[in-house]
Amino acid sequence: MAITLLITDKNMAVQGDPLTGWTSLDVTTNFNAPAAGTVTLPAYPEVMAQLVPGHRMVVIRDGAIWTAGPMEEPTNYRWSLDDPGVGMVDVNFSDDLATVAGNITWPEPALTWAGQHGSTYRSFTATGAETIIRTLVNENCGPGAIAARRIPNFVLDSVASAGTNTAVSTRFEALLDVCRTVASAGGGIGFRTRQIGSQIKFGCYAPADRSATARFSTGLGNLRSVAYSQSAPTVTHALVAGTETTGSTVRTYVEVPNTTAASTWWRVEKYVDGGAANDTGGELTASGTSELNDGAAPVELATITVDTPDLRAGRDYGLGDQVAVALPHGLQLIDVVRSIHLTATPGDGEQVSSVIGSQDATSDPRIVRLVRTLNRRLGRLETR
């Protein structure tokens, strides 16, 4: 195990020596969502001096940055008479997608907040998913945003030519929620931030099918445990409605079906607020497609894997890639890597686990996922 922990400021300037004495590290990186990490440290004065608002945690694994981003809770400190030393501090951190997540979509991003118009939407029709995501991020928090909204040292990464054409109309919605919807409807592409030198680069990518080379099984010695379940879809027919209209204009309704899922399981209808007046540019169809992807028959596959010289997370497979898992009873599953979980202690070394499966495959409790979905839908209603 070779893990190095550094603290930097917003300009990526390292603030001190690599952190020593840490007792545990826990980092989960997520596909198209911010990471979540915690490290426990002795509260030495030289360490506490670095744990200030605005600073960032950088986790380096085997010489490459595993994750880097802001400290969301820099000083969760504790001390007691039972342990009369300097005390311990837990540092909770994320990756730089968390700073992107702090923004909403402005319908007129070139104007100030006071200059926004109440009925305006930021709309894209028949446009590549990567182009939409890059444009929304650039104009809401990147170098193309008004000065007050720009993330320091934040630039756009190289174009990856990923995804297919889709459409979206948005205003005052959580920026990453819109990006996830576009990524899902536009070919299942990924987006991420990367620290390269003194810059934070945001870009999209096309996940790879690595199922022929990234395989986990007991026979290969890289699979410690596996839990597998499959559930019925929550929607097979998305019934999308355009926004309410007045006068003689007829409200638009679009049905987006998944006939394969319906014939395999049964028909499950779901009403979807399309967020647009009509389907001229494909906005309503895109909303339905995203809903079908969210509600696909969940294959939830939680594994505990072991890195080997031949197969390592971050080198041989990554978030969004398709990998293969051979279950002990003979069935082989191929699906998407949704999250990668790294835990480490100086005494026990490191362990890497992953959550693999459909869009709904996650380690979050179902009630957490439900609240997240409800918040997204309420946000749409509030911005009408």
Image (tube, rainbow, N blue to C red):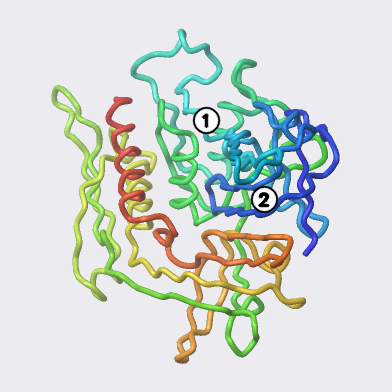
Looking at the rendered structure, the kind of residue marked 2 is: Ala
Q: Quadrant of the C terminus?
A: top left
Residue 286, x across and y down, in percent: 38, 47
> Marks 1 and 2, Cα distance to the nearest angstrom?
25 Å
Q: Which mark is residue 120?
A: none
Picture quadrant of residue 123: top left
Looking at the rendered structure, the kind of residue marked 1 is: Gly
Q: Is residue 35 left or right of residue 43?
A: left
Q: Nearer the viewer, residue 357 or 203?
A: 357
The reply to whether residue 138 is visible in this rendering is: yes
Residue located 53% across and 13% down the image: 111
Residue 138, x across and y down, in percent: 61, 31
Residue located 58% across and 54% down the image: 28
The residue carrying pointer 1 sits among few (fewer than 14), some (14 to 19) or many (20 or more) residues within 10 Å by Cα, namely few
Q: Is residue 330 left or right of residue 287?
A: right
Residue 110, x across and y down, in percent: 56, 17
The residue to which callout 1 is attached is 102
Q: Are dots 1 and 2 in contact, CB under 8 Å? A: no
Under circle 1, the secondary element is loop
